[in-house]
Amino acid sequence: MKFAKLIRRNLFRNKLRSFLMIVLMGAIFFLVATLIQILTTFETMGGAPTSDRLVVQSAFSLATMLPYSHEQKLRQVPGVVEVCKSQWLGGYYKERRNTFAILSLDAEKFKTVFPEFTISDDENAAFIRDRQGAIVGDDLMKRFGWKIGDRITLHREIFPFDPEVTIRGVVHHTVMGSVLYLHQDYFNEALKWNRVGTFWVKVKDPNQMAALSQQIDAAFKNSEDPTETFTEKEFNRQFVNMMGNIKVFFGAISFCSIFMIVLLAAITMSMAARERVTEVAVLKAIGFGRGLILGLMLTEFVVTTLMGFVVGVGGAALLYRSIDIAKWTMGFLPNFRLYPSTALICGVAAIAVGLLAGGLPSMKSANLSVVDGLRKVV
Amino acid sequence: MAIPLKYNTGNLVARRASMLLTILGIGVINAVMLSMLALWHGVKKTTIASGSPTDLIVMRESAETELSSWVTREAYEIIRTIPGIAKATNGQPLVSPELVILFKLPRRDSGNGSNVTVRGLTPAGLEMRAVKVIEGRVFKPGTSEVLVAKRIHDRFANTSVGDTFHFGTTDYHAVGVFDAAGTAFDSEIWVDESFLASARKRNAYSTVLVRPADAAASKQIVDAVRNDNRLKLQIKTERKYYEEQTSGLFGIIILVGFVTFFMVIGAILGTMNTMFSAIASRTRELGTMRALGFKRRAILMSIVIESALVSLLGGVAGVLLALPINGISTGTTNFRTFSEIAFNFRVDGSVALTGIVIALVAGVAGGLLPAVSAARMPITKALREI
């Protein structure tokens, strides 16, 4: 690596230009990494390891609720271990921007049906005992500085009901840290509807899920409230589908952004190549080969784009690690983190940008005739 | 004395290769930004512009959307008799009781189900919501016939005239397609109110729409509804209702803001970089001009103007690049109601102008720093540069 110093000196021969270039790359890679990560997050959403659950919702729409009486019938389906009613309430704490996931469910079934959430037995028992109790994700506890025993009032979003709950326990989960669960009974008492949005069904054999979901839907086919049963992953996926064609949309934005930096980098790099024509001619005159010149310049350009990549993607990774963006997205994308796969894609893109944008200027320099180069006054 | 503009245009021509790249680069940035603005413009058009500024919508007190609202038939009868309501051609008051329900219907492309808003209307409602029927005819009262919005017809299966689609235990027959000029109603299916109520076993309305005779009457009606203790209903203009609905589209709002922000940064840094390069290659030239007697201020202005010129061309290129997306129809879900809303990207004059102005501002901002550094250069040093 005896040329490392040469490359380093060339990288910063025009400090301002390199700085601007790196900041520009950084900004764009930050954007692209974020977009790709959002897509990846959606793609992997609901891929919980304990996928022994089916979600039963109304065949009409998610906004249509199912009668409580369905629960009995669901239990009779062979292969069903446990059934837990659950309702998305939505809502916020004090101000609208403090929106997070608020759900009601059958408290006594929580640990059986959702075993991937960890909660101490004492706290869980306290939650089950108190009809107006709630259990809260650890991120939320931190965010609002809540303690166990705090009494809080939540503001309604969908139903005409402002829940007043006492925090009885803290739940831990790898991704779902911003969620609050309260009693289904408390919710139903307030509204007296005897209807619920979803039934979460724990099954005995995860391999039988497809057959079981058909069986369930068949059982309610001729009732007034037909059902549609999803695996948990499909259930979550439908929210992504609802957003429309974001894949194409985000892809187009990312592609245009990368294309744009290729163009702007090409200008800068040809500028960088042009102002050292004489220098390159001297190098060639003292015996540097064509390939070596090409390699040196390309390395320099790729290093520049990679530095932009480090600034942008590294910045994004640090930022998303240190802040909870769910605060600004009304509870959307909780625990948003940059995956290594996203960084890898951006890294490859950065190298490609360097090669594409720097290719022509480097080639020109490499093919420069010594006589012309030495004669040229820039 | 100012440096003639010709100097700048001449420079652009002399450095055409890198200038073209810059213009194209800024053009792409601007096109992405414009598509964001076009998206937001389309969304705004379908939501905010949907509501009539004068018609009043009556809903259950705590309801935030039509879907979670209900108004009893008794309340409707009370509302009908409030004085000050405009009269229809047949002499009946222009009061429209409406039933709004979500149907989950399969999309044309993927077959995936998505929630479509289905609105049950009476003849009064049809008269109040004057839409253009572009194919077929309006549904007959009391039948299972439906009128489908063009955008829903384009996106959902079995919704063409003559088709039958199935929901629950009922078949619905499409008899017409309507165009609601890009408003939220373009994401709906309309059906006879009484038929929908019996098919879905509903005995209350969702909302009641009231048309006041004039502005004074409007205030009277609002007071009458608010002060009637029997009703316990809220009343507001339809426009206000639709304005409130945009909060369910926060995802789009955040996305538009986020991407636009980065595109503006990209445009500023990109211009800055190009302009620094442009100056670096003509240091001696600028020194000569100073020596000839041009003031520092003149140099500064000249560079800023050149930068603005490049950005302006980039802005125009962006508009041209963004034009093909105009009119593309897409859809998303309003997460407040879980209902599908369709909208178009709209690249119209105001969007194009906003884009060009932002490009121009970014150009001036990006040109400022290079211009200052060029103007500050000592003459002797500049002249010595090779």
Image: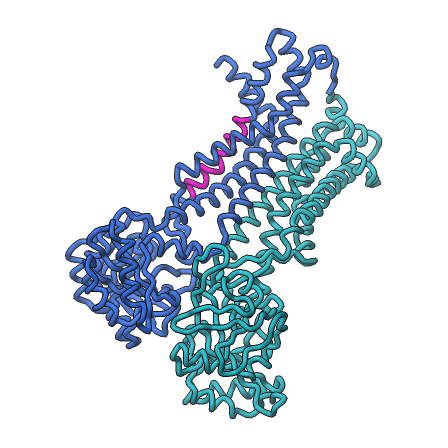
Q: Residue B148, how many percent across, how many down?
A: 54, 70
Relative side of A271 to A103, left or right: right
Relative side of B171 to B35, left or right: left
Q: Which chain is blue?
A: A
- Residue A378 image-quadrant placement: top right
Q: Which chain is cyan?
A: B
- Residue A196 image-quadrant placement: bottom left
Q: Is residue A317 magenta?
A: yes
Q: Residue A328, how many percent across, how many down?
A: 44, 55
Q: Residue at x 22, y 59 (%)?
A: A110
Bounds of the magenta segment: A302-319
In depth, the one of B88 and B195 nearer the eye is: B195
Magenta residues, dominant SS class? helix
Q: Residue at x 78, y 34 (%)?
A: B11
Q: Residue B142, how many percent across, how many down?
A: 49, 83
In depth, the one of A47 and B107 nearer the eye is: B107
Q: Residue at x 62, y 52 (%)?
A: B325
